[in-house]
Image: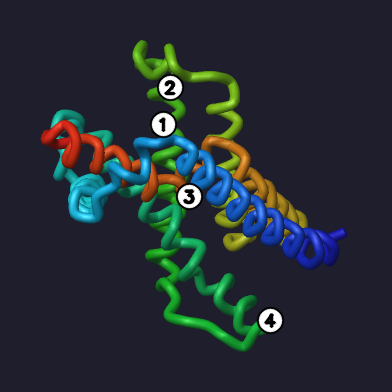
């Protein structure tokens, strides 16, 4: 079972991720082409200006109004992306499979970044059940997606530190990672695919059409 999860199932997950992501992006671009105002309003200058302001901490007014959540959100996204890419065990597997590799995070730093993801997910969960505004727009699927996101980090942390039987926890870690990869193109996690496009459109509409800032 472990060999199947770590082998064919992982490859299937990456195939679904790549094909599904391409399908969603192409579908969105095709749909935008049918709208007479999307492409004509797109402005490279205003798109880049908007992207920069929303990618820099505290650059937007809304970020400055909620400094605690800004720190939590940026810490979450940075650790979510950087940790899996530069994790030493992942790089070892990559080198064994493909003969390529790159710089890896020190073990202590990787542990801290993993815990940051877990803690920030707990904060997001508590915010969804305590904040009236956030609670109003929250659906059961949001809790499922939150669990899908944090599961690979919890299982990976437990497996690495041998808190439970290593092979069992490793299998759960890989399985949870597979579920997350497959979910990306077809759930609200797809915002990671569309962020550049949506932010570019919003920036262009506000900057080039309304002559105002979108931040």
Tell me the mark number nearer the camera, choosing from 4 and 1: 4
- Residue pointed to by mark 4: 97
Instruction: Report the front residue among 66 and 111.
Output: 66
Instruction: Report the front residue among 114 and 133.
Output: 133
- Asked if residue 198 is positioned above or below residue 98 in the image, the reply reads above
Q: Report helix, strand or loop for mark 3.
A: helix
Query: Looking at the rendering, in which quadrant would you find the N terminus?
Result: bottom right
| Residue occupying image coordinates x 24% and y 55% | 44
- Residue pointed to by mark 1: 124
Q: Residue furthest front?
A: 36
- First along the sequence among labels 4 and 1: 4
Q: Residue furthest bottom?
A: 99
Tell me the mark number nearer the camera, choosing from 4 and 3: 3
- First along the sequence among labels 4 and 2: 4
Mark 4–mark 1 Cα distance, whole angstroms, equals 36 Å
- First along the sequence among labels 3 and 2: 2
């Amino acid at each position: 079972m472990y060999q199947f999860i770590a082998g064919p199932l992982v490859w299937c997950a990456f195939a679904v991720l790549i094909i599904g992501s391409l399908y969603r992006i192409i579908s969105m671009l095709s749909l935008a082409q049918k709208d007479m105002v999307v492409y004509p309003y797109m402005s490279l200058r205003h798109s880049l200006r908007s992207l920069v302001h929303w990618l820099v901490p505290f650059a937007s007014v809304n970020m400055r109004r909620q400094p605690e959540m800004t720190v939590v959100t940026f810490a979450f996204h940075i650790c979510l992306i950087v940790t899996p890419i530069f994790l030493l065990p992942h790089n070892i597997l990559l080198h064994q499979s493909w003969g390529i590799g790159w710089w890896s995070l020190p073990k202590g730093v990787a542990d801290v970044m993993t815990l940051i993801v877990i803690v920030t997910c707990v904060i997001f969960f508590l915010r969804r059940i305590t904040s009236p505004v956030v609670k109003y727009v929250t659906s059961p699927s949001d809790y499922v997606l939150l669990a899908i996101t944090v599961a690979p980090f919890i299982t990976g942390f437990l497996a690495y530190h041998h808190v439970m039987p290593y092979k069992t926890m490793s299998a759960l870690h890989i399985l949870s990672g597979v579920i997350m990869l497959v979910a990306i193109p077809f759930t609200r996690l797809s915002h990671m695919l569309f962020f550049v496009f949506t932010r570019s459109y919003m920036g262009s509409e506000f900057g080039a059409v309304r002559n105002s800032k979108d931040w």
